[in-house]
Image: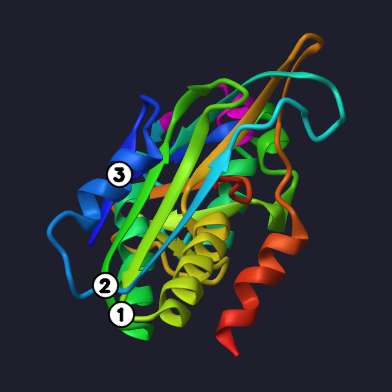
Amino acid sequence: MAVRLQEEPFDLGDEVARLTLGRTDAGAVVTFSGICRDRADSGERLVALTLEHYPGMTEEELRRIEAEARGRWALADSLVLHRHGRILPGEPIVLVVTLAAHRKAAFEAAEFLMDYLKTSAPFWKREETAGGGSWVAAKGSDDAAAERWKA
Amino acid sequence: MKLLYFAWVRERVGRAEDEVSPPAGVGTVAELIEWLRGRGPEYAHAFEAGPAIRAAVDRRHARPDASVAGAREVAFFPPMTGG
């Protein structure tokens, strides 16, 4: 169970290898990685994203979200890794890995972690384009995705 | 009480943090926002979005009616866009 914040890019394969090394109890590993696209929400070509966050609260909030997931599903292990700072198109932004005995718990927990992270972890994206820059607006569909877990 | 601002709230206020001592009548997040709006045009501009602005009291998400009594750190920011 871990939460990590970092500026530098990460390698999906390395992270999964580290989590699964020597384990024989987890029959299912689910990973989700979010990648920086080359289009801004406006349709313009994206030069870079800058991720701002709330140092201190971000870590606490990610830990709260992870603890909530582990209370709902029997996970063998989990990782939530999020980058901040300047991120270029094609680079990874976020990684969620869940390990469980069977796939259902691993799939559901990974989706829950991403849905909650998007609406409650204090990160803000700023898009940089040739024409300048602007803050990304939150999407109502993200709120709806997080809301359905409350039922 | 330490105030922190993030993303476009920070840009509009023109600084990342403030140290303030609100008057006795300021007991909730909403009352704190109302009081801040009177501090100058940059605050009025930053907080004109009203309910669109989110808050955290001592690093936990807080609704407008949440108490700020005894809070060490209150943060204001737009809806989050991570992930």
| Residue A42 vertical placement versus A27 (above, below) | above
- Characterize the local packing of mark 1: few (<14), some (14-19) or many (20 or more) Cα atoms within 10 angstroms: some
Q: Secondary structure at mark 1?
A: loop
Q: Return the residue at label 1.
A: A101
Q: Amino acid at mark 3?
A: Glu
Q: Residue at x 47, y 53 (%)?
A: A121
**Are the residues at dot 1 and dot 2 in contact (C-beta closer than 8 Å)?**
yes
Q: Residue at x 49, y 72 (%)?
A: A107
To which residue does mark 2 refer? Answer: A26
Same chain for mark 1 and mark 2? The answer is: yes
Q: Alpha carbon of mark 1 to alpha carbon of mark 2: how far? A: 4 Å
What residue is shown at x 80% (from left), y 19% (from top)? A45
Q: CA distance from mark 2 to mark 3?
A: 15 Å
Which image quarter: residue A136?
top right
Left or right: B40 with respect to A102?
right
As drawn, the label of residue A15 is 3
